[in-house]
Image (cartoon, grey):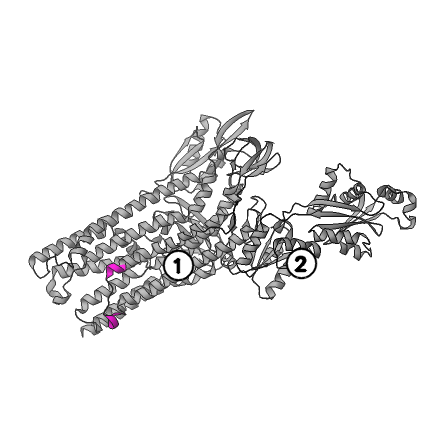
Amino acid sequence: MKELAADVGGLVVIGLIVWWFWLSKPKTLHAGEGTPIDIVVADGVYTPARIEVPAGRPVTLRFLRKDPSPCAEKVVFEAFDNMTRDLPLDRPLDVTIVPDRPGEYAFTCQMKMYRGTLVVKNP
Amino acid sequence: MGEMATPLRLSIGGMSCAGCVATVENALRAVPGVADATVNFAEHTASVTGRAPAEALIAAVKEAGYEAAELRGAEDEAQKEAAEMDHYRRLLRKAVVAAVVGVPLMVAGPLGWLPALSTTGGRVFWLAVGAATLFVLVYSGGHFFKGAWKAFWNHSANMDTLVALGTGAAWTYSVAVAAFPHLVPVLAQHAYFEAAAVIIALINLGSALEMRARGKTSEAIKRLIGLQPKTARVVRDGQEIDIPIGEVGLQETLRVRPGEKVAVDGVVIDGHSTIDESMLTGEPLPVPKKTGDEVVGGTLNKSGTFLFQATRIGEDTALAHIIEMVRQAQNSKPAIGRLADRISSYFVPGVLIVAVVTFLVWFSLGPNPVLGYALVATMTVLIIACPCALGLATPISIMVGVGKAAEYGILIRKGDALQQAGHLTTVVLDKTGTVTAGRPAVTSVVAAPGWNETRLLQLAASIEAGSEHPLAEAIIEAAAQRSIALQELTGFEAIPGKGVRAQLAGGMRQVQAAAGLPKALVPAAAATGQLLLGNEALMRSHGIDPGSLAGEAAAMAARAETPIYLALDGATVGIVSVSDPVKPDSRDAIARLHAAGMRVVMLTGDNRVTAEAVAGQVGIDEVRAEVLPADKAKQVEALQARGEIVGMVGDGINDAPALARADVGFAIGTGTDVAIESADITLIRGSLHGVADAVAISKATVRNIKQNLFGSFVYNFLGIPIAAGALFPLVHLLLNPIIAGGAMAMSSFTVVSNANRLRWFTSGEKRP
């Protein structure tokens, strides 16, 4: 009986892991036009980590890295020709890109532990 | 650390009086996000705190009518290093605090020195230990918990998640057991505080070690940045003054004394010296410089004093371009690493699921005490998994490999080129300027009976006057050396791959004068004054028989010289022989390519006999002679059609299509002209050893990446099942979570250290 309860509980936990980490999405920030989007790089996450931007218009992401560990040092935009920028510590760095096609594009640290998503939609 | 603790520094140009200070400061303070801005008039710098990016600040200063640039380079690196050192010390401190609590428990436990949980005294002791471990989790492991929490609300999971869950579960279970031992069976009454503390200690120690090892991976960039001098001595109004490097203007005159570095790129206008360029080009011998020669910023003046005029400054210098290229290449990723990238996005949630399954299996099927075993196995799974090692495996090796290449004057543009260069089966070399020095000189002039050498050279040089072909330059140079005045010709026409046609102005009289012959020797009917200068193919295509000169030409070709015929009105009148000596190290470098298992093919527009003579001197396997410039890419394609993986080595301009067609294009640079965009790999130093070095470094780097990937895959995909207890049914082995913590802590460090081995790469070149 105990085992059955544990198994059911375990399956529920697995379901929650799948749903929370793979199926559901974090809160999306809808970027206003023209103003840079501030992204704080600290404690293993980009904040905000999911940003919606219109297609075909330049978007500026302003990264402020507060995590001194080397993991946070680089931000990589793989879908944009692997564009990589070194983030200075405690100093903002602007990264401007023009996402021309709708879709979801990840930006990550080198080790893929820091993860963010650029959601590009038709305006 | 507070927000924006490090001020951003700008160099400000154009400030003439103290009044400007207030204008610039006000302009900077008006930029949104600026907390404060102060201008130092003496240093011509500004220091800005706040959240505004450099671009916005520079724009504001420019709008106010001044110049501004961000001060970077060595200073920036120094700041970064200080911050890293600070972080390193903090990690070590955290590790020591955690070890002070964890290690005595770990030692005393197995020795039976610790009280049992079944007594009241024992419970009090263990609850006190629990409080101490809580302090460890907060002080030494707080960042894992904070990171895990933040990641969770971002719907993501990372290494922090695994560490926080593993140690958090151990602590919670242990506190529950210490407070309410009757709730768990006697056999399961065991606290795991020491595991939580020691794991936190080990992971902090591992991060600290990894950080130090990582610092070494960027040594190449640091070295390049360090080459940039901070000041320059300019000559203004007849006076020599030292100014910050950022203030040197274009066309300014600079003085360099012995032992000093050249500040920016320029051209020598007075004096001469020898310059050590090894730091940029890898060229071991100092290079002599005289008036008119180019000098490159960052190189070291050895013996003389000279003046030079600045031609490229700031971000435009060769050194700045090299640094930028290396930076970009270090961040690129070859195809080999992409699998690891795909896996890493599913990795941590995957490990969480494995951990849950592990718990369930032990809980349902495990021996007694099931709860104890289930907890230990689950904790070990969470702790042993190391996504970082997997993610780090490729980029860290690329970082070191590309940096090492830069030390040898090899600039690799993309990670894919690095991967391909190690697989080349054939290397195609352009002859002129690649195998040979590219500075041809006239070695002999043979005139037909009745003609003299001076006249011959005069006509040949006059025909070539408009051409920029290296052979043409040699002939013009030879005429100039003998002070021969050129003659005016008309009707120039270049015949690609063959030569040039031109017309003597003035008809018959000119022909006689040109030949320096009495009227009787030139048949009047034939005397139209048509001149042809070029190879044997050109003569034959005009129906001209080289006659008795053919033997001379063959002898020249056999000596690796290029015979160039001159014909007047359908008859050969002489040969000018031009020779381009092979580079002294071409032979050794080609031997190294052979030793690495590659065939070496030479392409040239030159005649077959000359080409074969050159090939014989340096040990080339196959010669493709008389190839028209436009056909070089086709030759590369033909080799590829045979299944060869082809590396093409040539100059970046004329050979651009062939370089682009090859699997890997190597542009062989002259000096430090690195504006060579068509090639995958640029060899700053003109030696073919660069090709052999590039191939060797590529092979070493790809091997290193494979070791790292293999190591981290095997580590994770064997380690996790073992941690889950896969060996338990067979040999009754269940991994101790502390060992898992140690293994995890060392895995990233091992990957970084393995990549660092690439720093010890040495060229196979025999150096004097």
- Residue B118 drawn at (x, y percent): 9, 62
Q: Is residue B602 above or below residue B277?
A: below
Q: Identity of the amino acid at label 1?
A: Asn
Label 1 secondary element: helix
| Residue B43 belongs to the span the image colors magenta | no
Image quadrant for the N terminus of chain B?
A: top left
| Residue at mark 1 | B708
| Residue B737 belongs to the span the image colors magenta | yes
For residue B32, which quarter of the picture?
top left
- Residue B34 drawn at (x, y percent): 39, 39
Dot 2: chain letter: B
Dot 1: chain letter: B
Residue at the (28%, 51%) spot, across then down: B205
Q: Is residue B200 above or below residue A4?
A: above
Q: CA distance from mark 1 to mark 2?
A: 42 Å
User: For the magenta stretch, what is the residue range?
Assistant: B726-740
Residue at the farthest left position = B120
| Residue at mark 2 | B631
Q: Identity of the amino acid at label 2?
A: Asp
User: Circle 1: is it few (<14), some (14-19), or many (20+) Cα within 10 Å?
Assistant: many
The answer to which of B52 and B623 lies nearer the viewer is: B623
Residue at the (53%, 37%) spot, across then down: B264
User: Circle 2: is it few (<14), some (14-19), or many (20+) Cα within 10 Å?
Assistant: some
The answer to which of B477 and B745 lies nearer the viewer is: B477
Same subunit: marks 1 and 2: yes
A9 left or right of B274?
left
Q: Is residue B575 visible?
A: yes
